[in-house]
Amino acid sequence: MVVTHRQPISLVTGICAGRLLGVSDTIPNITIPADLLPSDGRFGSGPSKVRTQAVDALAATGTSFMGTSHRKDPVKDIVLRMQDGMRQLFSLPSDWDVMIGNGGATILWDALTFGFIAQKSQHLSFGEFGSKFAKAAQQAPHLTDPTVIESDVGSHPVLVADDAIDTYCFTHNETSTGVAMDVTRPLGAAGLICVDATSAAGGMRWSPEQADLYYFSPQKCFASDGGLYIALASPAASTRIDEIAASDRWIPAGLDLKTALDNSRKKQTYNTPSLATIFMTMHMVEWMNKNGGLEFAAGRCDESSSHIYDWADSHHLATPFVSDLSMRSSVVCTIDFDDVVTADTVASVLAANGIVGTDSYRKLGRNQLRLAAFPAIDPDDTRALTACIDYVIGELT
Ligand SMILES: *Cc1c(COP(=O)(O)O)cnc(C)c1O
């Protein structure tokens, strides 16, 4: 086994190295003037810009935090600060839980098919992430086939109230396409509302009255690192988790939401988490709260994203991909380019100048740049970014 694995890996590495060389050969040699550059060049949609202040604060903990037990107070205190920070940021009612677990949103989808969907779910599928969760539910042998409602990329469909549905699932912001939708309980729906808010949470407004499970990974708006999921759970959601755990359904221990819920209430995770991720998430949520909470954070996203859309609207070679204004994301902006500009080349030139993460979502296959407008990103840097793109396009055309 070891031998058969080794060979293809070295082969692939060889090919990759060759390809990388090939690409860098063809990147036009363009130097963006230093006075145009943003102070921080990270515009990726995940992993996203981590504030250097968070990294510095983590380093400043020295010997007191990293490398210590996640079952002891120095770490549990930070977990609690992170949980309390989320309660404050989202104005959660006191009977909500702030669940945490390992594996990020992707692994949580599997856990939800075991421990949250009772029998039949409804999914909105309008991009990569929503469709992956729908597929997980479709493949789960113990569930009834879900209802999946699709729409063209660049738009979103709407939930349809249905008595047969116990769980409604959708994405607050579809990171792959830059389409956002409001978190709203469909009129007359009795099922629970389960929201993938991975790239929206902390950057977009929503009300806890409209959702039951609002979950995310912290490497997007929370400017932290990956590997963790955070799931805000209403009392109805935690009751659902308890009920399924008490049923005779087989649930793998690592995907057991009841175990995650119980551990979260003790400021812990079932197995060892990334302490750095937890620390930097805590640091970011406290920074948001100190500066005015969700209104402050979402306001920064609004400022950056409206600058990007206004810029694209007035640019003769650029067009916002999402044409319906009500569906345009305020945290991830997708901008299409006229054929005379190759967006990938623009992204490569930007990267060579230290501005990274602007490439489009590969599978979307458009001549597009995707620009994050997350709370950590300074709107002044967003203005610098579009000036840099203008400069590069000017040099290329
Ligand atoms: C990034 C992302 C995910 C996947 O998050 P992981 O932490 O990599 O599992 C899921 N949903 C959305 C909307 C995302 O943006």
Image (cartoon, rainbow, N blue to C red):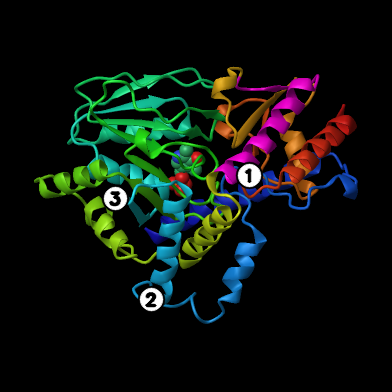
- The quadrant in which the N terminus is found is bottom left
Q: Earlier in the sequence, mark 2 or mark 3?
A: 2
Residue at label 2? Answer: 73
Mark 2, other Cα within 10 Å: few <14 / some 14–19 / many ≥20: some
Left/right placement of residue 47 relative to residue 263 reads right
Q: Which residues are magenta?
A: 295-322
In the structure shown, which secondary structural element does the residue marked by tag 3 occupy? loop
Above or below: residue 47 compared with residue 125: below
What amino acid is found at the position of numbered circle 2 in the picture? Asp
For the residues bearing labels 1 and 3, Cβ distance under 8 angstroms: no
- At 32% from the left edge and 36% from the top edge, which residue is drawn? 136
Q: Nearer the viewer, residue 160 or 256?
A: 160
Which of the two discs, 1 and 2, sits closer to the camera?
Answer: 2
Q: Position of residue 253 (x, y in %)?
A: 22, 56
In the structure shown, which secondary structural element does the residue marked by tag 1 occupy? loop
In the structure shown, which secondary structural element does the residue marked by tag 2 occupy? helix
Query: Does residue 339 appear in this view?
Result: no
Label 2 and label 3: CA atoms lie apart by 24 Å
Residue at label 3? Answer: 95
Mark 3, other Cα within 10 Å: few <14 / some 14–19 / many ≥20: few
Left/right placement of residue 243 relative to residue 104 reads left
What amino acid is found at the position of numbered circle 1 in the picture? Gly
* Residue most extreme to the bottom: 63
Which of the two discs, 1 and 3, sits closer to the camera?
Answer: 3
What amino acid is found at the position of numbered circle 3 in the picture? Asp
Q: Residue 44's mark?
A: 1
Q: Earlier in the sequence, mark 1 or mark 2?
A: 1
- At 61% from the left edge and 56% from the top edge, which residue is drawn? 50
